[in-house]
Image: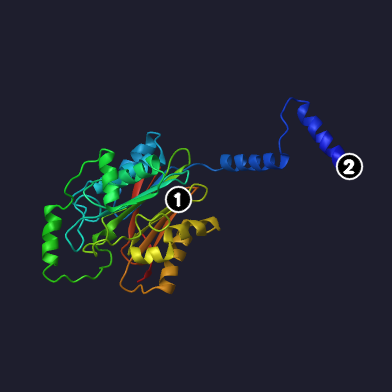
Amino acid sequence: MNTRRKFIKKSAVTAVGIPLINVSNCYGAQQEVEKNISKKIIPTVISTWENQKANEAAWNVIKSGGSSLDAVETGVKVPEADPEDQSVGYGGRPDRKGIVTLDACIMNADGDAGSVSFLQGIKHPISVARKVMEETPHVMLVGSGAERFALAKGFEKINLLTDLSKREFEDWKKTSKYKPVINIEQHDTIGMLAIDKNGDIAGACTTSGLAYKMHGRVGDSPIIGAGMFVDNEIGGAAATGMGEAVLKSLGSFLVVELMRQGRTPFEACKEAVMRIIKKQQFGDIQVGYIAINKEGEYGAFAIQQGFNYVITQKGQTQLIDGQFFKK
């Protein structure tokens, strides 16, 4: 009987000149096509903190038909180049030795990723991270190796320490007291996620790290799965705040996996924050997450009051105060 059924199935297919295929696979593929057709793509840009200009730059890329990858790189380069933003790139506050060190990572819809850490003298670490992703077999380059790579790729070496940040550093040295302050300096990071017109998701994260950190300290921002993570089937997430807390929980990866299990972006962000609260000392630190899913739904959650984020959809940009645990 099984042989007869196989013969009939094969005869019916070949009779109309269609190659024999696996019917079960075909059915699954058809379901996936119908699923995709039923979902309306909602191009989206979301970023941490008050980064409206970054969102607008990224949105202009999306609006013109550009990729989500180009959008997030273009977007985060805005604060990287702003000397008045003392938490990212040029003008960032230095470490305890008076040296500005930068971290960044980027991830595309195919799951490729690039990262640089402890990079000095280069204004746009996000673009160097993209070069690592696209032009090397590696994911991460650090320190002098990252710097040499950047220079070899044509990036210009500059002095990242501005007069303002230098003056503040000199004042800090009078006491040399180090204590993280909740929500100061926008918590040293811009994380950005985008969905383009094709429905593809990409993410980027860039920072100058905690002000007056130990020389050599690296936080979560350049670490794929901690500072930022994207899975094009599900969505993306990015973190900001105390990097050590995010590193211990691989927070951005956790958020995406929670969305895979059916949580909304808000629910996933909240659960990731609660993991920190349950297992770590959180009283004097801030951590916030942003997330989007494949349908363009978004959400955010933080430990402390004061975290906000920017969302752009349908050409409209909003600054939203994130919900939080500790009032």
The crowd level at tag 1 (other Cα within 10 Å; few <14, some 14-19, many 20+) is: many
Q: Is residue 40 visible?
A: yes
Disc 2 from disc 1: Cα separation:
48 Å
Above or below, 84 relative to 301: above
The earlier-in-sequence mark between 2 and 1 is 2
Nearer to us in this view, 42 or 217: 217
Secondary structure type for disc 2: loop
The crowd level at tag 2 (other Cα within 10 Å; few <14, some 14-19, many 20+) is: few
Above or below, 151 relative to 91: above
Read off the residue under disc 1. 230
Expressed as whole percent of the image width and height from the top left, the position of residue 36 reads 57, 41
Read off the residue under disc 2. 1
Above or below, 176 relative to 58: below
Q: Residue at the spot x=45%, y=50% of the render?
A: 230
Expressed as whole percent of the image width and height from the top left, the position of residue 21 reads 71, 35
Label 1 sits on what residue type? Val
Secondary structure type for disc 1: strand
Nearer to us in this view, 320 or 132: 132
- Mark 2 vs mark 1: in front: 2
Q: Is residue 54 visible?
A: no
1 on left or right of 62? right
Nearer to us in this view, 175 or 120: 120
Label 2 sits on what residue type? Met
Q: Residue furthest right?
A: 1
Picture quadrant where residue 28 is located: top right
